[in-house]
Image (cartoon, rainbow, N blue to C red):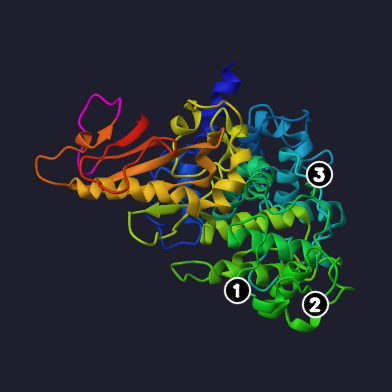
Amino acid sequence: MMKKILSFLLAMMMLTSVAFAATFTDFDAAHWAYPYVDELVANGVVNGYEDGSYRPDANVTRAELAKLLSVQFGTSVEKTYTDVLEDQWYYDYVTASGSYFITGTEFYPNTPATREEVAYAIYASKNIKSATAPATFTDAADISEAYQAAVAAVAESGIITGYPDGSFAPKNNITRAEVATVLSRAIKADNHQAQYYEVLKMAKLTDRSYDDNEPLSYGDLSSATLRMFNNEYKLAYYNLGDMVGKRPFDHPDALSFWVIGRDVLGAEIVTEAMIDTPISVGEAIDAYAFFAEKHDLDKRTIDKTVLLPGVDRSAPLSYFRFAQLVTEVDRQIPVLIKVVVTGGATADQPTTEIRKDLSTYPSNRKLYQAILEEVPNAVYEAPYEISSAALTGTYDFAREMKSFLLNPLNQFCQIAAHNGAQIKIHYYPSLVQSKDKVYVMRVKLEVVSAQPGQLINDICLTELTRPIKAGDVFFCDLNTNEQIPSANYNGGKITIDKIYE
């Protein structure tokens, strides 16, 4: 017991020595690794030194790496070494991480860890899935044979990436800044594959079964891209004039392929011989980024250099990589549409992000086509009055026929306006439930303003006990089956079935 206590106290003076906030004498937000270090410090994973420094460029020893991995990811099989003695602070950590390192009878605990050794340690401690192809770094031949599979796997997973010149530098020592970056990515890696799959399934871009390594064809990618950015599953191909109904050849994805070819890849590529052949990673990035920018109301641009980092642009695009691409583009330009209704002739259509952290999903996630960042779990978990069926069945209708459902929402806004209140209604296709042609829309209602002394309760029939006033924002259910006055708005009532606060 005394040995373990002593080991703990001594270890606290090493890499993860004294707890500080993410404010250091030699390291600040201008450093490229600061966001990773700041995150790990906040979570108590790494710390600075007693003198207030972080020493981002200092090397990390093999013993320090063993401690980080065994504490963060658990221990493996035990292995003893001739140069690791029981009275040394790192004894327990090194002996408990036997399968995380390729070793003989000696461990060399005070030797700086190399980048290829760290790649292997992460690969082994996290049980990272094997790569679909060898690493493509410019210096891939310099990677030791024993480490090649591990480097390829962690690179493909995005945990360890190369340098701007395309090299990996496998024999370079790894610094404290680099270790913090790698560790932050590795901690999050548990969810990445599941996150990608969830995002792909939510967006409902294809009928094909998800298979990590299955390549997508030009036709698959073309239709999936147009579905995402036209916000419809059954593609109507608006604004194509005479092309509609005149596919260049007989194939369900032919017209989509023609659009992608015309706008991005070049019309000459659109042939019957090409449509079912795999599309490359680079071509998919170009097509997907183009349509993300084209359909973005804020006219933002995509930084393509950070999409699918470390992945060979000439390689075929797999389902796993496509799902990752959808997720990474969504981080730059959220692509799931919501509609904000104000009672005017037109409604703006801003975007809202798909929730990436699966650990925060509501307990009834399977009922919904999409889980969004801005919608609290309480809203998802509250039952609908008219049905307990999954809302995924309503999603296509609510998304593609939203103009039908926006009419009563605009009337709600107009009733409020005629009674001295201005409201906005945030409409989400993924929150619409139906039964017997009655639609309940779970929306976010924003009270922008109200006349002095005028409470919106005067025009809303609700079960809320407190007054609703200007500045309030809440989720509620609006029912299309309620009778809404259309000729005379004065004195009309907005029927809100339920309020979720």
Residue type for callout 2: Val
- For residue 501, side relative to residue 377 (left or right): left
- Which residue is tagged 1? 239
Quadrant for residue 344, please give it. Answer: bottom left
Residue 433 x %, y %: 53, 36
Sequence-first tag of 1 and 2: 1
**Numbered tag placed on residue 102 in the rendering:** 3
Residue 336 x %, y %: 54, 54
- Which residue is tagged 2? 270
3D distance between C-alphas at marks 1 and 2: 19 Å
Between disc 2 and disc 3, the foreground one is: 2
Between disc 1 and disc 2, the foreground one is: 1
Quadrant for residue 280, please give it. Answer: bottom right
3D distance between C-alphas at marks 3 and 1: 60 Å
Placement of the N terminus among the 4 image quadrants: top right
Q: Which residues are magenta?
A: 462-471
- Can see residue 423? no
Direction front: furthest residue: 487
Quadrant for residue 178, please give it. Answer: bottom right
Placement of the C terminus among the 4 image quadrants: top left
Residue type for callout 1: Asn
Look at the numbered disc 3 and give the secondary structure of its residue. loop
Given residues 353 and 177, the one toward you in this image is 353
